[in-house]
Amino acid sequence: MPQTNGDITNRGALYTPEQRQRRDNTVWTIVQGILAPLQFLVFIISAVLVVRYLTTGAGYTAATLSILVKTGFLYAIMVTGAIWEKVVFGQYLLAPAFFWEDVVSFVVIALHTAYLIALYYNLLGPDQLMVLALAAYVTYAINALQFLLKLRAARLQSQQEVQYV
């Protein structure tokens, strides 16, 4: 049976009242709120450096280092995000509310990890590595958009609940 809050139903809502309370009370929400914009900033800088290398041939080392930093942020946000999901939803990954975001995140991680492996084992040339990084970045941008839309949905849900309290 759907939970109710005043006149509105929470069926299809992103968070139950209990989940929202856990979300609001865990330090992992703050950690995610700090890491996400930092990762996005690093992504923008790195994407510029990668495109610069691909268009001019200059700055391979800077582009490579920026990809490594971006990948480090990605791993950090994925680990802390899994912990956040466990605290809020009771499972580390693929909670129904974030199922598709997590699925796309797996692709993002796979592409970044493929880059690291290809770099370490010298499996691809510089241009191919940068193209792989761009593929990872496009997927990351799609995933970031998913999370921004989810954040917007959560804010709208909170606003609706406040109106009916």
Image (tube, rainbow, N blue to C red):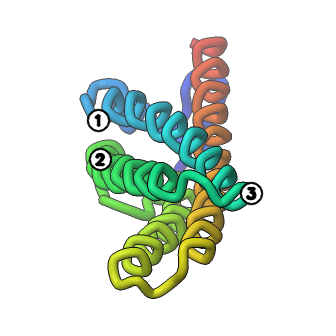
| Element on which disc 1 rests | helix
Coordinates of residue 151 in the picture (x, y in percent) = 58, 34
Q: Residue at x 55, y 46 (%)?
A: 46
Provide the residue designation for mark 3: 55
Q: Is residue 40 above or below residue 126?
A: above
Q: Is residue 44 visible?
A: yes
Residue 89 visible in the current orientation: no
- Pointer 2 with pointer 1, Cβ within 8 A: yes
- The image shows residue 105 at horizontal and vertical percentages of 50, 62
Which of the two labelled residues, at mark 2 and mark 1, occupies the earlier sequence position? 1
- Residue for badge 2: 80
- Please give left or right for residue 71 compared with residue 151 in the image: left
Tag 3 secondary structure: helix
Q: Residues within 10 Å of mark 1 (few under 14, many from 20)?
A: some
Amino acid type of the residue tagged 2 in the rendering: Thr
Q: Where residue 127 is drawn, which disc sits there?
A: none
Residue closest to the eye, 34 or 73: 73
- Residue at disc 2, secondary structure: helix
